[in-house]
Image (tube, grey):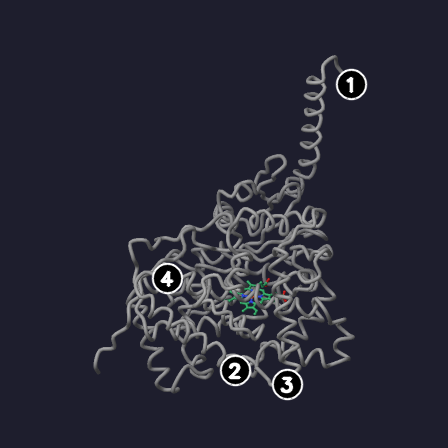
Amino acid sequence: MLLTSTWILDLIIFFGIGIIFMYIYSTRKYDYFKKRNIHYEKPIPLFGSIFPVLSMKTTIGEWLRQLCNSTSAPYFGIFVFDEPYIIIKSPEIIKHILVKDFSNFSDRTVLAPKHNKIMSNMLFVQKNPDWRKVRSKMSPVFSSGKLKGMLSIINEVGVDLNRYIRENLGQLETKEVTAKYSTDAISKCAFAINSHSFKDENSDFRKVGRAFFDFTWRNGFVQIAYFFKQNWASTLRLEFFEKWSLAFLRDIFWKAIEKRQQIGVKGNDLIDIIVEMRNNKDLCEELNFDGDKVVAQAVQFFAAGFETTSSTLSYTLYELSLQPTLQTKLRNEIISNIKKHDGITYEGLKQMKYMDMCIFEALRKYPVLPFLDRRCNEDYKVPGTDLTIEKGMPVYIPLMALHYDERYFPEPEKYDPERFSESNKHNVNGLYYMPFGEGPRICIGERFGMLGVKVGLSHILSEFVLERSPETPVPVKFEPKSFLLQSTVGLPLRYREFQPTAA
Ligand code: HEM
């Protein structure tokens, strides 16, 4: 008993004071946009404006889309808990931020956790100046020469993929099928290991993939902390990826490196490239490139490549199953291309223009990342506007909202590859279509990702016809527990063998 004669009353008073303190603290910046005459989404104490996302009622991509539709302003504010964030809708301003004035916005907001050396050395989260050095050294990994070398590895996985489909004809969960394919392709390219996902539902790599990206409460909470409340994530030492999964990848990776160094035979994969880098003493010194910093590059390859490739491939197949005419058009292109090039070749894949259009349109409707983020490094006056973005301010580009904006893409819900035909030019006076991001921090694996998707489409559509089944969700409902656009019920489709008609 401190203040009153009963401890219950004391407790109520302390509790009340605590609530008042939290209220005052969490709302102290809530006049930020009002003072600057910037349109903003009204916050609620403690949570800010983003409560619908935090309570997992909606996905962040869909929420930002709703907000963008509710105002004609070129930019507006939101509050994430107690912090103001600026959302940029104007394609011209976006171009300034991502490309022209990149030096002011060269880092992402997501945490690079000091407590985890693998995670903090992944390119996606790395901050400058380290990011610049590692990016320039990793870029050659994705050169045409290296990609051509990796094509034969991915093609082998494509053969396993079609064998699996043939053995399981009927209804298949397409997202799971494409996840097996991308898991095997990336584990072979980055770790020189066949993870046998098609044979073993619970192969170790597949388990790691699930642990990384399946929508669980744990993953939802950690993603929120890493993207929105970095100080919580570092104080609580939260792990973005579960410890056992990183330990598994680290172990596999070093074994692969040792084996490669012992036998000295090249494999045209990431392991070769890393071995080359490790043998270059100057480079290792410059980057302080050893131990977990090296492992980080392979884990990055897996983490960034596995879900992105399988998501894009599965959504393209899903949309084509709903529109058989488009599916036939693409199949015809694939079959004649395979005949012309005597198989699935690098040159042949480059020539399939309709395939590009189908993938670009799938990426418009289902961008793997529904928003891009940057943090302002120093006060920045946006050219041609009254807006000054202050140092430290997080800036979001609402990718999904832009991809569904009727001004750029009429009837946005409709899947129409013709939007990306040669005659339809995009991003002429600014940026609004960017499934791989833009500027110096654009996706480093864009060409590798496209290669994986194209090889997968070529294998599947040359041999199978995909159809909608009663279980196929139309339209797709996105899982609010995930930052990525994942269907709540997967993408079940019916597969049957393609029977070519005699010419
Ligand atoms: C269809 C497949 C893919 C899509 C749609 C995609 C999309 C993206 C997007 C939107 C970004 C953010 C760009 C920005 O902020 O401007 C990104 C970054 C990144 N992606 Fe991809 N990605 C794909 C495949 C891959 C693959 C296969 C890899 C690696 C093997 C990869 C590695 C990365 C890395 C390392 C970054 C961070 C780059 C940096 O900060 O320098 N991605 N990706």
Whichever of labels 2 and 4 marks the residue nearer the N terminus, that label is 2
State which quadrant residue 446 falls in.
bottom right
The residue labelled by disc 1 is 2
Q: Residue at x 59, y 68 (%)?
A: 301
As drawn, the residue found furthest toward the left would be 502
Q: Amino acid at mark 3?
A: Gly
Label 1 beta carbon less than 8 Å to ligand 1: no
Q: Is residue 216 visible?
A: yes
Q: Nearer the viewer, mark 2 or mark 1?
A: 1
**Element class at badge 1:** loop
Q: Is residue 230 depicted above or below 462 in this figure?
A: above
The residue labelled by disc 3 is 264
Q: Nearer the viewer, mark 4 or mark 3?
A: 3
Measured as percent of width and height from the top left, residue 155 is found at 45, 78
Q: Is residue 329 depicted above or below 211 in this figure?
A: below
Residue count near mark 1 (Cα–Cα under 10 Å), binned few <14, some 14–19, many ≥20: few
- The Cα atoms of the two marked residues, 1 and 4, are separated by 65 Å
Quarter of the image where the C terminus is located: bottom left
The residue labelled by disc 2 is 148
Nearest the viewer among 316 and 276 is 276
Residue count near mark 4 (Cα–Cα under 10 Å), binned few <14, some 14–19, many ≥20: many
Q: Amino acid at mark 1?
A: Leu
Whichever of labels 2 and 3 marks the residue nearer the N terminus, that label is 2
Q: Residue at x 56, y 75 (%)?
A: 192
Measured as percent of width and height from the top left, residue 167 is found at 34, 69
The residue labelled by disc 4 is 318
